[in-house]
Amino acid sequence: MSVTVVIPHFWGYLVNGVKEVDVDCRTIGECLTALTEHFPQLNDLLFDKKGRLHGFIDITVNEKSAYPDELNKPVNDGDKVFIANIIAGG
Amino acid sequence: MEHRTGRLLRVDLSTGRVTREMVDEQTALDFVGGRGFGINYLYREVAPGTEPLSEKNKLILVNGVLAGSSVQAVARWMAITKSPLTGTFFRSVAGADFGAWLKFAGYDLIIIEGKAEKPVYIHLTADGCQILDAGHLWGKDTRVTQQWLSQQYGQNTRTACIGPAGENLVRYSAIVSGRRTAGRGGTGTVMGSKNLKAIAITAQRSMSNESEALRNLIRRQVDIMRTNKAFIHHKEMGTTETQDVTNRLGIFPVKNYRLGKHPDHEKLTGAEYRKLRVGEFGCYSCAARCGKAHLVTSGAYKGATSEGPEYETIWSFSAPIENSSIEATIAADEICDDMGLDTISTGACIGFVYELYERGILKKKDVDGLELSYGNHESMLALVRKIALREGIGNLLAEGTARAAATLGAEYYAMHVKGLDLPAYDPRGAKSQGYNYVTSNIGASHCFGYARQEIFGATVPRPVDRFAEAENADIVIYNQNLTAMGEVGIICSFSQGWGWFPEVYGKMLAAVTGVERLADLGYLTTVGERIFNLERAFNVREGFSRSHDNLPKRITSEPLVTGGTPGEGQVVRELDKFLDRYYQLRGWTKEGVPSAQKLKELNLGSVLEDMAKS
């Protein structure tokens, strides 16, 4: 099914300004894997060395957080997947 | 215990008179609590033109409506005054337990006025208030001061105090409680100018009389937080790895805002700090415990320990002088907490003097023989102490970057807005954040309207392009009003991202105050807007106008250097265009004065006359 992954603006410089990518996937994990196939340079920004999603990355689907167990969460046709940093500043 | 007591304590240090008053009903309705109460009383009671370090200035310590309850992350308190650093309205926020203890003693706020003839401290209980001799505490650091007061009055005592920096009237001195500080703007300096060393509160922690409605809301809050990833991550790391992100974004300001990325950023990461962590601590009724304590176990700084540093301090004692020793940063943080110094302005001021030294504007003989070459952290630590004690070059730096620059004819290198040093986000790569510095009512504060949208990619109220300028004026206003409405609570700004704010928060305010419309976010936003506008009116009355809503020339003329990360070559280009749009959206005149129509709309008609004179 077709899902749109929105690339955060702060990674825009890594992907030549591409803002979103349509991928064919059934889970968030598959969506992000498809994204990193398009843009391998995003792999280290999303995943740690053991392939787990970084603690400071939050994934939302249609503006709702997918935490916990994000990578196994199913997605539906037409969903929009957002990536955000959740590190607090101050 | 009632959560909004409606009571204020007024302490006149000149006469020794202590009075208890009730907050009037209209104030309670219009300003709700916390920061709202603070600006309301400051505007009414501090006359325009008052010298901040004179006995005519007032220092207001206020908790939030929800302090002392079982609600999570609302035990913040703030110090509000006319700042000796900026000359503006100022509010500085702190954590730990003091805000809850003020509530347990039965008060929403304390107004301190006048000046004691000799050093004193205030001891407050639910039964009374005494002004006592503090001669033996004068000169003592904040740790020793708090230990003595705890020994004197027992474990149910919480203290807010100043250190030697406040006594010496360093213009950016902090008020310290536990190891948390109301750091910015010189609220500790005002306390020192009144010869007030400390306020100790002895009170019983109260099992509060919480309504069923409030209890249900707390259960909902906790349920939301328990599964919120931002909360869970914050609990684990605090802000000790924010520099990993800001370096990547190219907005970690290095060498007095000449670079946007630290050359040795891999030595400063959250993972490196994690290796030195020895504990964690938190505020009253907050499960996050986001304060992370560190201990240096080897090398020249062995034994240095701090209940921090958090992100801003990680920055202020590394980037300004291009230091890559996190051990030196921990040591500097410890000294600042002991001495009662704002870490941001201290580090920024030191970065300023290092640049002057590099450029030959200051010679070795001018800086007490110190070698101020980049990376030299021994000299950085020496300067921290000199500033606190006003020794040698420290006496000039204690006046703050803006005043020191004016004395030296080096204004170009002073990185401040309205006298408040810029914090750890470069406006050239985070422009809404930068425009918040421009228009904030306290100068360049990162937490007066934090642009979560452009730094962390938050999508509420809408995604933004962090390099866009005037078109994001609405975002700057949104963030500022949201912050103000959160600070009637007073919620911790970190908790804004934990899923319960603002909806559950509004309902909690309504449950506690009985004012149903506080659950309406539209009304609550209006409260935030009212507070922001009254603060602006205070500044306008002091002579601030459009020309003061500015940025350092470096930010508007020197392209950002990031070494190839995003933001390379950026400058802030649209200041005038931004201000036009921002003022228009705010309902202000072209000079940045709140219009009569806006003031009436916000039920601030009483300040119309003052604005007409401006």
Image (spheres, rainbow, N blue to C red):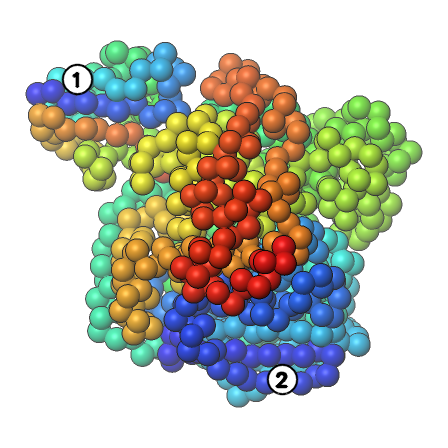
Looking at the rendered structure, the kind of residue marked 1 is: Val
**SS type, badge 1:** strand
Do discs 1 and 2 share a chain? no
* Residue B146 image-quadrant placement: bottom right
Q: Is residue B395 above or below residue B469?
A: below
Q: Is residue B611 above or below residue B150?
A: above
Left or right for B49, reference B107: right
- Give how far apart the Cα atoms at labels 1 and 2 are: 69 Å
| Residue B327 visible to the viewer | no
- Kindly indicate whether the residue at mark 2 contacts the one at mark 1 (C-beta within 8 angstroms): no
Q: In this view, does B347 lie above or below B558?
A: below
Looking at the rendered structure, the kind of residue marked 2 is: Val
Residue most extreme to the right: B365
Q: Nearer the viewer, mark 1 or mark 2?
A: 2
Left or right for A75, reference B390: left
Instruction: Give the residue displayed 56% in from the left and 79% down from the top.
Output: B9
Residue identified by numbered label 2: B18
**SS type, badge 2:** strand
* Residue B5 image-quadrant placement: bottom left
Q: How many circles with numbers are drawn on the protein? A: 2
